[in-house]
Image: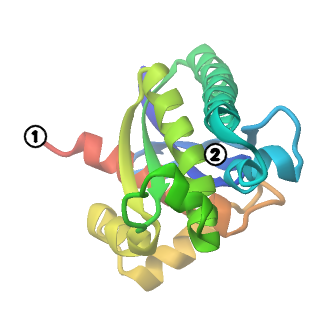
Amino acid sequence: MRTAAAGFRVHSGWCAMVALTLEDGRPEILFRGRLQLVEIFDYQFRQPYHTAVEMDGTKRRDFISQIRKTAENLASREVRRVQAELADRKIRLRTCGMLASSARPLPRLEKILASHPLLHTADGELFRDALMAAARRCKLSVLPVKEKEVMSEAAKAIGLTPAALRKRAKDLGRGLGAPWTQDQQYAALAAWIALSNRRKPR
């Protein structure tokens, strides 16, 4: 059974997911999709920390906790669906690369809610954390890759120059149709890094 890796690039309320395998050292795209991480795709749920600013007391924490739990459940369901589809093709999805931010650890909730820049950071981290928990629930090993370092990390793991890698990332989408934007390209690179690292001798 062949082994595959998934890559995720997370946004507020959704993420891009790409799964690939290596065939004779060349990446083969197996799945490309958009995972919705909220039940209702509107501002209230996609920006939970922004929404919590207008709430009182424990309602804030309860609301944020519920959004995180829902995101984890939705992501788990979709990842398991992809795993099952690939298993039918004799391919095992066992690992993933997760594009991560370079933000510092977040302070306590009250400080987050008092800072507009921290609200944006916290919203993004909530969905990344939920997706990471979902991946682990699905028995995937998780390799975080800082987004600003994805090109250098991929070049090191794969053995291509950054320029060659950018071209390769774009070319991977040929024949798939739209969308194949930076979201899908970065997700594919994260998956490729995770799969390459898994194949290295330990």
The numbered mark, 2 or 1, whose residue comes first in the sequence reads 2
Number of the label disc, if any, that sits on residue 17: 2
Q: In the rendering, which numbered label is found on residue 69?
A: none
Question: What's the CA distance linking mark 2 and mark 1?
Answer: 27 Å
Q: Secondary structure at mark 1?
A: loop
Residue hosting label 1: 202
Nearer to the camera, 161 or 179: 179
Q: Secondary structure at mark 2?
A: strand
In the picture, measured across the screen, residue 78 lies left or right of residue 20, that is right
Residue drawn where x is 47% and y is 31% of the image? 133
As drawn, 102 above or below 55: below
User: Is 121 above or below relative to 29?
Assistant: below
State yes or no: discs 2 and 1 in contact (Cβ < 8 Å): no
67 displayed left or right of 51: left
Give the colouring mode of the picture: rainbow
Find residue 61 and report its horizontal and vertical position in percent: 61, 36
Residue at the outermost left position: 202
- Regarding residue 166, the answer to whether it shows in the image is yes
Locate residue 79, reporting x and y percent: 61, 27
Which residue is rendered at x = 60% and y = 65% of the image?
Answer: 114
Query: Percent position (x, y) of residue 20?
Result: 53, 43
Quarter holding the N terminus?
A: top left
Amino acid type at circle 2 is: Met
Report the side of 151 relative to 43 (left or right). left
| Amino acid at circle 1 | Arg
Question: How many C-alpha atoms fall within 10 Å of the one at disc 2: few (<14), some, or many (≥20)?
Answer: many
Q: Residue 154 lies in what quarter of the image?
A: bottom left
Q: Does any portion of residue 172 appear in the rendered image?
A: no
Q: Position of residue 153 (x, y in %)?
A: 33, 67
